[in-house]
Amino acid sequence: MGYDYTDYDLVVLNKLKDYKTVITVGEDVAYFGGLIKLVYKNTGVSDMTLHDISGIARADCLIIGDGIINSDISSRLKGIEAGTVIALSKKTSLNRCCNAFIKHGYEILNVSRVKVREGEERSDLLFTLKKHLAVINILEKNLTKRYDKVFVLCPRAIKSGGPELLHQLVYHINSYGGRAYIAYVSMDEEELLVHPELESYVYGRICRVRDIEDRAENLLVFPEGWPMRINYAENIKKLFWWLSVDNFISACRTNGIDEEKKAREISAECDILAYQSEYARIYSMAYNDQGKPLIHLGDYLNDSFIDNSKYALDHKKKDIVVYNPKKGIEYTKKLIEEAGDIEFVAIENMTTEQVAELLQTAKVYIDFGNHPGKDRIPREAAISGCIVITGEKGSAKNEIDVAINKEYKIDDSKDESLSDALWLIRDCLSNYYDRIGDFKAYREGILSEKEEFLKDVREIFFE
């Protein structure tokens, strides 16, 4: 197994992921500064000693320990405007700590107890304060685990929509107090490489497939890309997660497996069947001979897109059409050849931030690929203020997965579709501000996906 943080470390680190400035006060909690630097390489983390607390003007998050709480904390709080305070203390210190903040004009919005390893002497107390509009509420309800450990199969060192989603699942299970691990599937399993953009989701909670603990109280999550491993273990409970119908079919054919027979075997063998898209739900239902319930386990976009969405329509837009060269490239090439007057820009060799910046600048995003699942880039484009034009293959065919007006979906199998697509693209570039309102409902639905995903995680993995 890789380095395994304690439950106590992990809960705190999960809650600090998005803060720019974290200040730890007191020797008993100062080591969190080192952990944060190690995990996030965050130069904004400061470790402060007891006498420094009176000089704090503003921090996104303040961590205080018993050394502070049990001292004359009231005299040291004046002027502190931390949006979130994590108090790592024994139960007996809670009232003293809360009363001290109240005395200095802070409104305590929430208090929650974070479970730690059995036998731990102290409880971890997290509360959010309201003062001078400095409020960051990151409280998450503590739940009872359905499974002792959850192992999630994932390809190694790859950054794309599917692997990021698998890492996000591990992150949120752990955030709610579970114990989840990414289990990397690799031909060379001696070296466990995590993609640098995904590392902060797992904090060392990684393992090799051979390290999966085959016990009845554990759960193994199979994404659709490894149908051949469905019989891997005998005792562990199994969840099959339909992320991409096309990837499942491709994996079966590559390994000489009858996909229909394998789909029926999966329905029979797995304890839980989950789907990410309406397209996958319909496909899975066709082979669910036992009539097992299908459970929705969706996804959500990277926070970098969501955070910028409120300003998406304020950006100065250019007459640019963005496309993904890995999706429907043959048809897209024909469009590019026919439209020498239009600037097309491919999404390739870019970081998440670079993709977000490009989409915020462009007016139109096109995708004539197979849409094997509920693809992320069309949603990233829409939330970034792009008009989205797709074909009608895969998940784009239904009105749930790609919830845009039919007007913006081109049947590229028809001979006249090329001229229709070019006319639509040109009209969207010329009349962008008249047409962008057609995507308001689509964008609003995308913004609600994270909360829906968290609800799915709570219902499936916790009681």
Image (cartoon, grey):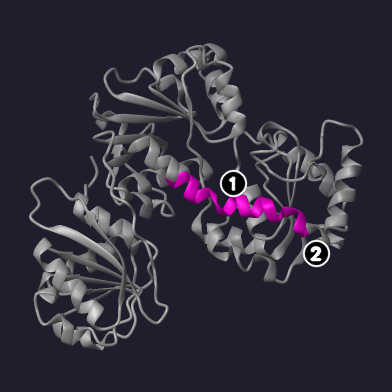
Q: Is residue 388 left or right of residue 184?
A: right
The secondary structure type at the circle numbered 1 is: helix
Q: Is residue 384 left or right of residue 274?
A: right
Q: Residue at x 70, y 56 (%)?
A: 440
Q: Quadrant of residue 402?
A: top right
Circle 2: residue type:
Tyr
Task: Name the residue carrying label 1.
Answer: 376
Residue 442 percent coordinates (x, y): 67, 50
Residue 371 percent coordinates (x, y): 65, 36
Circle 1: residue type:
Arg
Q: Looking at the image, can residue 187 be seen?
A: yes
Q: Which mark is residue 433?
A: 2
The secondary structure type at the circle numbered 2 is: helix
How far apart are labels 2 and 1 at the CA level?
24 Å
Q: Is residue 447 magenta?
A: yes
Q: Which residues are magenta?
A: 436-454
The residue closer to the viewer here, 422 or 289, is: 289
Between disc 2 and disc 1, whose residue precedes?
1
Residue 418 percent coordinates (x, y): 88, 41
Q: Is residue 144 left or right of residue 374?
A: left
Q: Main secondary structure of the magenta part?
A: helix
In the rendered image, the vertical position of residue 80 relative to residue 444, given as above or below: below
